[in-house]
Amino acid sequence: MTRIPVILDGDPGHDDAIAWVFAKAYEDLFDIRAVVSVSGNQTIDKTTWNARRIATLLGIDAPVAKGAVKPLLEPVMTAGNWHGESGLDGPVMPEPDQPLFEGTGVELMAKVLRESEEPVTIISTGPLTNVAQLLMLYPELKEKIGQISIMGGGITYGNWTMAAEFNIVEDPEAAWLVFHSGIRLFVSALNVTEQALIRPEDIPRIKAVGNQVAQVTGEWVEFFIQYPMAIGYEGAPVHDPCAVLMLAKPDLFKTKDLYVDIELEGEYTRGMTVADFRSWGEHEPNCTCAMEIDQKRYIDLLCEALHAYDGRVVNL
Ligand code: RIB
Ligand code: CA
């Protein structure tokens, strides 16, 4: 199978980190060309530091760049209640084993697109600021983006507000540009990602995979599970891996092609993903949305992916 060039774009963040565990494990499919941070779960310096350490832990042999400092218009909103002060609280992590890319995140993304002979896939698990900047600053490179798989949106409800999901409401203008770009989009929104639940009883099974990455992943979940369970979830909604699995394991999901637009106005609705479920709607679908996930297989796939790291040990 031909490997597809991939840019990982996220705001690590525990679930971004676990998404990248999957992405690196699927190296027969994904050729990771770059990792780019964005502000979101925490401020940009924290998400960048976390991205560099995750890349070191997993052995991602690609440049890591510091992406957007803030959304296009809004100030940064962070989610320390979910991810802690560092943005990746919990286990000890290695020091980065490579220097930060000397340019900006969007410059690295453009470099990867320019140099790739094949269309490049972007897997975005944070606010879409980097992708929006890429489209605005390098319109001539848009055709080199083959597809974007996004964790974002609620489709029918929100988590950060009643109507809006965190990644989208953090930078609604960026999301609007991406959803109006005409690029092939795969969307994993809350209606599915909150089914991607890791429960307390799953943690021993994750750690029992028995390698260093599995131990760290189990400890990430042990931290990340605390806040959601305190507010009523039955476990940790590990959202971001869905954006990887929509490409790598599409049979894990039931999907629906929908027209989705981004609400930019409204005291209660700014950042809402508005989906048209009408068969007689006036718009052609602009994305493939995950609608259901095989929740049991999700944990099976995580444990299977973690075995890809058997024998890998880094200094912590
Ligand atoms: O709403 C969930 C999303 O916001 C996830 O990507 C999480 O990491 C945060 O970025
Ligand atoms: Ca994220």
Image: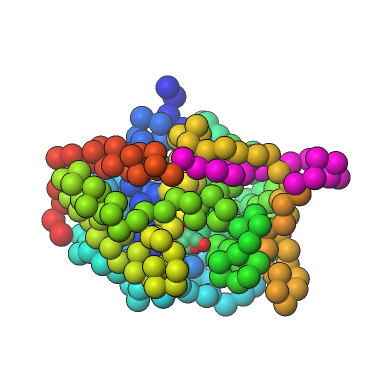
Which quarter of the figure has residue 132?
Answer: bottom right
> Which secondary structure dominates the residues rendered in magenta?
loop
Residue occupying image coordinates x 22% and y 64%: 91
Confirm whether the magenta stretch covers residue 291.
Answer: yes
Q: Which residues are magenta?
A: 277-294
Residue occupying image coordinates x 52% and y 38%: 253
Residue 287, x across and y down, in percent: 66, 43
In-image side of 271 versus 48 (left or right): right
Residue occupying image coordinates x 30% and y 58%: 200
Residue occupying image coordinates x 46% and y 40%: 294
User: Which one is nearer the viewer's eye here, 223 or 138?
Assistant: 223
Which quarter of the figure has residue 199?
Answer: bottom left
Instruction: Give the colour scheme of this rendering.
Output: rainbow
Residue 157 versus residue 193 in the image, above or below? below
Residue 194, x across and y down, in percent: 49, 55
Is residue 78 among what the camera can see?
yes
User: Which one is nearer the viewer's eye here, 82 or 77?
Assistant: 82
Residue 312 versus residue 168 in the image, above or below? above
